[in-house]
Structures are given as C-alpha cells and as structure tokens.
Amino acid sequence: MRDTHEPAPVTARVNGRTESAAVAPRTTLADYLRHGLGLTGTHLGCEHGVCGACTVLLDGNPVRSCLTLAVQAHGREVRTVEGLAAPDGTMHPLQERFWRHQALQCGFCTPGFLMAALAAVDEEPDMSRDRIRERLSGNVCRCTGYQPIVDAVEGFSADRAAEHAGEDR
C-alpha cells in the first residue's frame, strides 16, 4: 500500500512531449502544469471547476485541471493552450479566429475557452450558434459579453465543416 504522502510518478505526453515527474498525490493537474512544467497558460480562476479558465484537454476531452489530479494524467495525453500554436509560433486557426473577432479582452478566460472550443469543434465540426453557446456554457468570461467568442468559434466551426466536406469528396 502506497503512503499517501509519498510522491507518485507521473509520465504523460504534454503538448507532444513526454514529461515525467514525481508529484505529491494531491497535486492538481493545473499546479503540475503551471509549477512543475512552467506552462502558465493554464489559468486558475475559481479553483472549484466552475469558471473553466483551467480547461485543458486530457486524451482530447476537456477537463478542469483544477479538479483533476496530476496522477490522473499518468500515461495519457495532455494538451494545453501552449500546445496550440505551431512550433514556429504561427497561431492555430482557432487562435487566429479569436484574434480576428476580438474574442478576448483581459485574456484570463481565453485559454480555457480555446481548449473547450477546440474539443467541441473536433467533436461537432458544424455547430449552430445555439449549440456553440451550449458547449461553451461551462466557461465564464467577464469582459467580452460572449458574442465575439461565439463569432470566433462559429467561424472556426464553419472552416472545419468545410474541411470535412472536402475530405468526403
């Protein structure tokens, strides 16, 4: 039986790189990403799983990293906002849409929205505005009024739907 205070090994693919560390069993994934790996794009807002600022993708699914333990990522794929842009710094098409639609102001919620939106569009490439609102309803923004965020995701969703339609030909 493992001592609950003894560090636990965690090896995960984070943004395409294998990362290994020994962490306290109660370390959250958010704290591991921010403090252990220096990936500070994952923001901590409420630390109760309500605001969505800490959303990352775990095996492609959006999770609240403030409620997920780092040990739960062992052997899995984690993608953070830092993993969106290309290695040369070129923005991901979703980031480009957010920039073009001015879907960010203070930027605190933006990483969580980007990750939640990416997972939603990957799952449903052609969403209506109402469906986009529904899929992003777990993320909170206090600055934008949400319209620019919905506009950005709608544009990205339409782009993805067009890509999928082209692949089906």
Image (cartoon, rainbow, N blue to C red):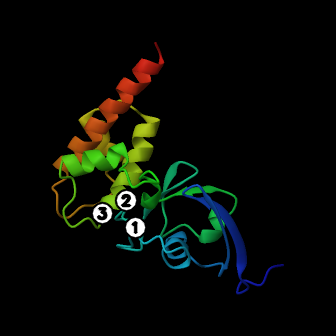
Cα–Cα span, label 3 and label 1: 10 Å
10 Å neighbourhood of mark 1: few (<14), some, or many (≥20)? many
With 119 as the anchor, is 72 left or right in this view? right
Residue nearest the viewer, comparing 156 with 45: 156
129 left or right of 168 in image: left
Q: Residue at x 32, y 44 (%)?
A: 134
Which of 4 and 97 lies nearest the eye of the viewer?
97
Q: Which residue is mark 3?
A: 109
Mark 1 residue type: Gly
The image shows residue 12, relative to residue 159, as above or below, that is below
Q: Which residue is mark 1?
A: 41
- Residue 107, compared with residue 96, is above or below; it is below
> How far apart, in angstroms, are the residues tagged by discs 3 and 2?
6 Å
Disc ID at residue 112:
2
Element on which disc 2 rests: helix
Inspect the image, locate mark 3, and give the three-letter code of the amino acid beneath it. Cys
Amino acid carrying label 2: it is Gly
Q: For residue 127, say whether it is visible.
A: no
Quadrant assignment, res 93 = top left
Write the residue at 51% across / 79% down: 35
Image location of residue 36, percent across then percent down: 56, 77
